[in-house]
């Protein structure tokens, strides 16, 4: 099944496509302590996006670019009872 996120629990990752070939990913921490949550491209379950797809990653709450992830994904540090939301854009520098 597509775009079901991770197994329900203290930490979850959700994501999917946006307009214009970009994507959104959210890292959710329901736990009582901060957590490092792995956000992987394979979690998108989108044809043409693989673990080697390269994205520029923008933190939507901070309104700042935070990564140019060259493969697989990244790790988000999420405070307890919080969420971080990112916009992923295929990096023109890495697209082929």
Image (spheres, rainbow, N blue to C red):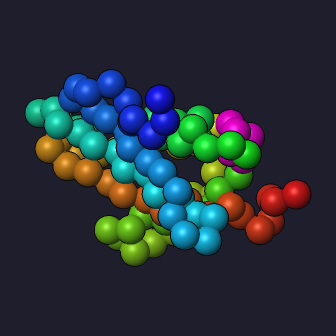
Residue 31 in percent (x, y) is at: 16, 32
Q: Is residue 51 magenta?
A: yes
Q: Residue at x 61, y 71 (%)?
A: 20
**Going by the picture, which residue comes out furthest to the bottom?**
63
Range shown magenta: 49-53
Residue 79 in percent (x, y) is at: 22, 46
Q: Main secondary structure of the magenta part?
A: loop
Indicate the quadrant where residue 50 lies: top right
Q: Is residue 66 left or right of residue 37?
A: right
Q: Is residue 55 left or right of residue 38?
A: right
Residue 87 in percent (x, y) is at: 49, 63
Q: Residue at x 77, y 68 (%)?
A: 92
Q: Is residue 32 left or right of residue 65?
A: left
Q: Is residue 76 visible?
A: no
Q: Is residue 16 visible?
A: yes
Up the image or down, 92 lies above or below 84; here it is: below
**Going by the picture, which residue comes out furthest to the left?**
32
Indicate the quadrant where residue 27 lies: top left
Total numbered badges shown on the rendered structure: 0
Residue 16 in percent (x, y) is at: 48, 51
Foreground pick, 69 / 96: 96
Foreground pick, 14 / 1: 1
Up the image or down, 90 lies above or below 19; here it is: above
**Going by the picture, which residue comes out furthest to the front?**
1
Q: Is residue 10 left or right of residue 58?
A: left
Q: Is residue 78 magenta?
A: no
Q: Residue at x 38, y 30 (%)?
A: 6
Indicate the quadrant where residue 33 lies: top left
In the picture, the quarter occupied by the C terminus is bottom right
Foreground pick, 86 / 48: 48
Q: Residue at x 42, y 64 (%)?
A: 59
């Amino acid at each position: 099944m597509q775009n079901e996120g991770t197994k329900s629990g203290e930490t979850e990752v959700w994501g999917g496509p946006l307009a214009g070939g970009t994507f959104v990913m959210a890292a959710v921490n329901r736990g009582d302590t901060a957590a490092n949550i792995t956000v992987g491209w394979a979690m998108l379950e989108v044809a043409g996006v693989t673990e080697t797809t390269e994205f520029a990653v923008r933190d939507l709450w901070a309104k700042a670019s935070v990564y140019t992830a060259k493969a697989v994904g990244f790790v988000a540090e999420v405070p307890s009872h919080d969420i971080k939301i990112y916009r992923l854009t295929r990096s023109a520098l890495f697209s082929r």
